[in-house]
């Protein structure tokens, strides 16, 4: 789950991490008022959207007068950045930057731990630095049973900063950011850039946090910040029914049990010349209600002209799955052709049950997929 | 032989009195697994499905000689369950539960490492050494005794592949689902080493998917160290960037973790890649 920069900075402040002061505004007048209240001649107006690359898109501008604040606020509010509409901006105090750094904590799959990542290449896209100059990136894996004792924070800070005065400020910052990371079940807590000002102060200029979806049940304060876009709302609704769903742009709706098999089904549709309309993992069981809900979800997409049901019957036997499907389709009225492929335990019995129904039943995955692609193309030509 | 589990496996089921734990305990016992105990704090002394229930994993180890644990407890209790098992004297822990907070896994895995105990999962289907032992939720009847090792991040996709192997006459030594989360226990590298060293495994199937770079590392390792033939399949060629495809770990982030990077890595390592699961038996045969 993602949150906005200003929300990440609110968390930073709660954990005593110094940030450039800023005010969130939803209209131009509030921006002007914020400018007056910040007592800073120079301010930065920053779009608050759930995506990176705001600067490149023109969503971050420096203003030095009320006129410039108005001009930039008008331009940025309502702007579209990578499909995200800007409905609020942050007006933040300008800072006299002496030097910029990168500092983050992230979950690392390989070391199976939280990793502290630092670089003197602050303000840059860190993935780009990692790709072009990996020697400029410092990584320290954190032992979860020990966390970050002071000596470790000091060791890290000395690797990043030359001045002992800055190191002294960095030690609690590193410890507090780790505390914030673990206490909120984050998957990323990033300060980029972290700057040393001309006055010698260490300040977070930008902040980004992502959170572990699996842990939201115990993070009500984080969950309250969830702002789903249209796609995410659809995914969320599917999730509440026990499905895992991702919308795509093709015409063949897929209903599959299991995430890996669902991905493989999409890939094979593409391989056979068709276009998958979605990823949908309906999980285990042959419950007819689940099939009904899944069909409703698939057919609510006007692009879908064929539905492919690919079920591996393991613990749930194929004859039970077939009975569930037949039962479900008693309640579903649709003229969209449905291709069904059942494999696994009792598959012959399952297919026998589907004989004489309106389903197109196929024996193998490739037969089911070529049939779906053929039907989809024929319907597309009408 | 096989890896990790066999006829000597003595299994304790953590959460045996729950719905899933009970259902699968019965299925595992039916397959022939030595299910020697279950745990459910406060229900020690009772029996579930004729299997003795204990208050703790340590009791199950001391009284029934359990050496392997399988976990079915709900996600909020998984961290404690893994740590309890790691502290009890079992040598292998398999966690089936999905939806476990990542930081819980990070901590529990570290504790298991300290205790010298191996962890598989969470969010995995478990593993099977056909004809010997089944630990987890895999459908035993689709497997066949044989000598191909299978490693996968997925559940039903593994069954699809195994089904194709079995009807193609290729049996399996051990098949393992390592789990679909970003942080899990045993992974490709550890398991490739075990299969390479297992005298009864003569070939390996590796089933990967988008997210992370474990497949790339596995490809490099295979090139450098694995003498047995390997065939691979990667799911998620059509997955859009930035979206989680069901598994928490199946996500292309910042442009990395794509299927193409993974298939390129295998191609470079000389590992043949199937474009659909049904091709895997032929790919293996051509290499054996």
Image (spheres, helix red, strand yellow):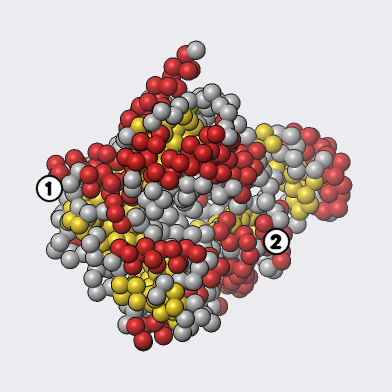
Q: Residue at x 78, y 49 (%)?
A: A24
Question: Can you give x and y, in whole percent of width and height, for residue B231 in the image?
Answer: 23, 46
Question: Residue placed at 28% from the left, 57% from the top?
Answer: B175
* Residue displayed at 53% across by 66% down: B74
Q: Does A244 sit above or below residue B63?
A: above
Among the 4 quarters of the image, the one containing residue B201: bottom left
Specify the farthest residue to the top. A382
Q: Marks 2 and 1, Cα distance to the nearest angstrom?
A: 56 Å
For this rendering, which residue is in front, A193 or B80?
Answer: B80
Q: Secondary structure at mark 1?
A: loop
Residue A221 numbered tag: 2
**Residue B236 at least partly seen:** no
Residue A107 vs A332, above or below: the answer is below
Q: Residue B61 shows which numbered tag?
A: none
Crowd band around label 1 with a 10 angstrom C-alpha radius: few (<14), some (14–19), many (20+): few
Q: Quadrant of residue A141?
A: bottom left
Chain to which mark 1 belongs: B
Query: Quadrant location of residue A340?
Result: top left
Chain letter of disc 2 in the image = A
Return the x and y of residue A25 as percentages of the image width and height: 80, 46
Q: Where residue B158 sits: x, y (%)?
A: 33, 50
| Crowd rating for badge 2 (residues with CA inside 10 Å; few <14, some 14–19, many 20+) | few
Q: Position of residue B85 (x, y in %)?
A: 42, 77
Along the line of sight, which residue is nearer the eye, A263 or A165? A263
Q: Label 2's element?
A: helix
Q: Specify the label residue B288 is tagged with.
A: 1
């Amino acid at each position: 789950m993602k949150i906005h920069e200003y929300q990440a900075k609110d968390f930073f402040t709660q954990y005593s991490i110094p940030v450039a002061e800023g005010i969130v505004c939803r209209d131009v007048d509030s921006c002007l008022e914020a400018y007056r209240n910040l007592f800073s001649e120079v301010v930065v107006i920053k779009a608050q959207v759930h995506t990176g690359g705001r600067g490149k898109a023109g969503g971050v501008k420096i203003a030095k007068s009320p006129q410039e604040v108005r001009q930039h606020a008008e331009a940025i509010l309502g702007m579209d950045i990578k499909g995200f509409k800007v409905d609020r901006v942050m007006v933040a105090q300008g800072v006299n930057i002496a030097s910029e750094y990168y500092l983050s904590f992230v979950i690392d799959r390989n070391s199976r731990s939280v990793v502290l990542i630092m670089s003197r290449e602050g303000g840059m896209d860190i993935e780009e630095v990692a790709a072009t100059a990996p020697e400029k990136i410092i990584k320290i894996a954190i032992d979860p049973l020990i966390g970050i004792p002071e000596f470790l924070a000091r060791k890290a800070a000395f690797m990043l900063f030359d001045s002992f005065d800055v190191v002294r400020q960095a030690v609690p910052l590193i410890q507090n950011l780790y505390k914030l990371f673990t206490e909120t079940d984050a998957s990323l807590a990033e300060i980029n850039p972290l700057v040393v000002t001309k006055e010698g102060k260490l300040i977070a200029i930008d902040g980004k946090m992502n959170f572990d979806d699996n842990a939201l049940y115990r993070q009500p304060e984080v969950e309250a910040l969830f702002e789903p876009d249209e796609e995410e709302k659809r995914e969320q609704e599917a999730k509440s029914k026990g499905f895992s769903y991702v919308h795509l742009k093709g015409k063949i709706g897929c209903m599959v049990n299991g995430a890996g098999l669902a991905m493989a089904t999409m890939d094979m549709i593409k391989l056979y010349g068709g276009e998958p309309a979605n990823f949908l993992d309906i999980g285990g069981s042959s419950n007819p209600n689940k099939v009904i809900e899944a069909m409703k979800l698939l057919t609510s997409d006007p692009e879908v002209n064929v539905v492919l049901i690919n079920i591996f019957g393991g613990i749930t036997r194929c004859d039970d799955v077939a009975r569930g499907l037949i039962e479900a389709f008693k309640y579903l009225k649709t003229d969209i052709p449905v291709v069904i492929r059942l494999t696994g335990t009792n598959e012959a019995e399952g297919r026998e049950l589907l004989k004489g129904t309106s389903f197109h039943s196929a024996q193998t995955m490739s037969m089911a997929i070529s049939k779906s692609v053929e039907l989809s193309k024929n319907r597309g030509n009408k | 032989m096989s890896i990790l589990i066999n006829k000597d496996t003595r299994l304790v089921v953590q959460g045996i009195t729950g719905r899933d734990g009970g259902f699968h305990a019965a299925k595992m016992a039916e397959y022939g697994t030595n299910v020697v105990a279950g745990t459910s704090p406060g229900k020690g002394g009772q029996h579930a499905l004729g299997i003795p229930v204990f208050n703790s994993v340590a009791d199950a180890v001391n009284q029934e000689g359990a050496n392997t644990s399988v976990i079915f407890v709900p996600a909020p209790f998984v961290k404690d369950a893994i740590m309890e098992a790691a502290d009890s004297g079992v040598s292998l822990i398999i966690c089936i539960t999905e939806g476990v907070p990542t930081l819980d896994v990070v901590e529990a895995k570290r504790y298991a490492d300290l205790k010298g105990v191996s962890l598989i999962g969470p969010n995995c289907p478990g593993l099977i050494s056909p004809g010997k032992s089944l630990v987890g939720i895999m459908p035993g009847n689709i497997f066949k005794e044989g000598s191909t090792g299978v490693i996968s991040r997925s559940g039903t996709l593994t069954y699809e592949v195994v089904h194709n192997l079995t009807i193609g006459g290729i049996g399996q030594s051990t098949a393992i689902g390592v789990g679909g989360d970003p942080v899990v226990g045993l992974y490709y590298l550890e398991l490739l080493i075990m299969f390479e060293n297992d005298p009864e495994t003569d070939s390996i199937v590796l089933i990967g998917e988008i997210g992370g770079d474990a497949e790339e590392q596995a490809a490099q390792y295979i090139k450098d160290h694995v003498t047995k033939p390997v065939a691979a399949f990667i799911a998620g060629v059509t997955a859009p960037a930035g979206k989680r495809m069901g598994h928490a770990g199946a996500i292309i982030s910042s442009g990395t973790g794509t299927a193409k990077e993974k298939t390129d890595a295998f191609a470079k390592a000389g590992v043949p890649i199937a474009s659909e699961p049904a091709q895997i038996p032929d790919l293996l045969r051509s290499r054996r």
